[in-house]
Image: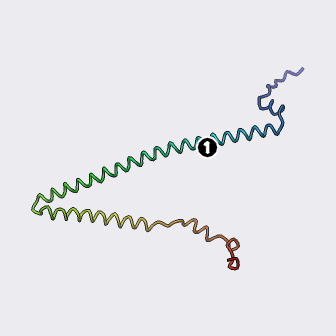
Amino acid sequence: MSTEYTPPATEAERRAQDESLGTLLSQVSTDLSTLIRQETALAKAELRESAKKAGRGAGLLGGAGVAGHFVLLFLSIALWAAIGGTAVGYAWSAVIVAVLWGIVAAVLAITGKKSLDQIEGVPQTTDSLKKIPEAVTPSKEAR
């Protein structure tokens, strides 16, 4: 007398024994389609939420840029007034402040140009395209 324990069949095992292969494959296909739809909906919702946060952040950065512009404007006016109250006078103090801003603009422009000149484009793609064998490229006769 054998007292070996055999666990009861699981739901999946019972379905595998009772249903045809075509029915099982149909159910798998339906489940897979549902899963893909749900994952796509989740991805869309996450992207929407990320886009909202990015939009809010960009708006706040834009506002900070405007506020920073006004800070620089009023600091420049204050510097102009401070220099203008001396023996230099207001006309020359305006020129001095303008020259200072011209120097800042020139330094930023030179630095920006150097940064842009360092851009290489797509070097890896260009290198990969150079390695394509001639057999793949159209011949002169086909043109």
The residue singled out by tag 1 in the image is 40
Q: Which quadrant of the view contains residue 27?
A: top right
Residue 116, how many percent across, how many down?
Answer: 43, 66
Q: Residue at x 37, y 50 (%)?
A: 62
Question: In the figure, residue 102 lies in which quadrant?
Answer: bottom left
Residue lying furthest right in this view? 1
Q: Is residue 2 above or below residue 87?
A: above
Depth check, front residue: 10 or 49: 49
Residue, x 13% and y 59% (percent of image)?
84
Callout 1: SS: helix
Q: Position of residue 18 (x, y in %)?
A: 84, 31
Question: Residue at the spot x=83%, y=38% of the render?
Answer: 21
Question: In the image, is residue 31 above or below residue 118?
Answer: above
**Residue 95 place in picture, x, y as percent:** 19, 65
Task: Single out the residue that lies furthest toward the left.
Answer: 87
Viewport quadrant of the C terminus: bottom right
Left or right? Give the position of 33 relative to 90.
right
Determine the residue positioned at 23% across, 54% down: 75
Q: Quadrant of the N terminus?
A: top right
Identity of the amino acid at label 1?
Answer: Thr
**Residue at the far bottom in the pictured view:** 141
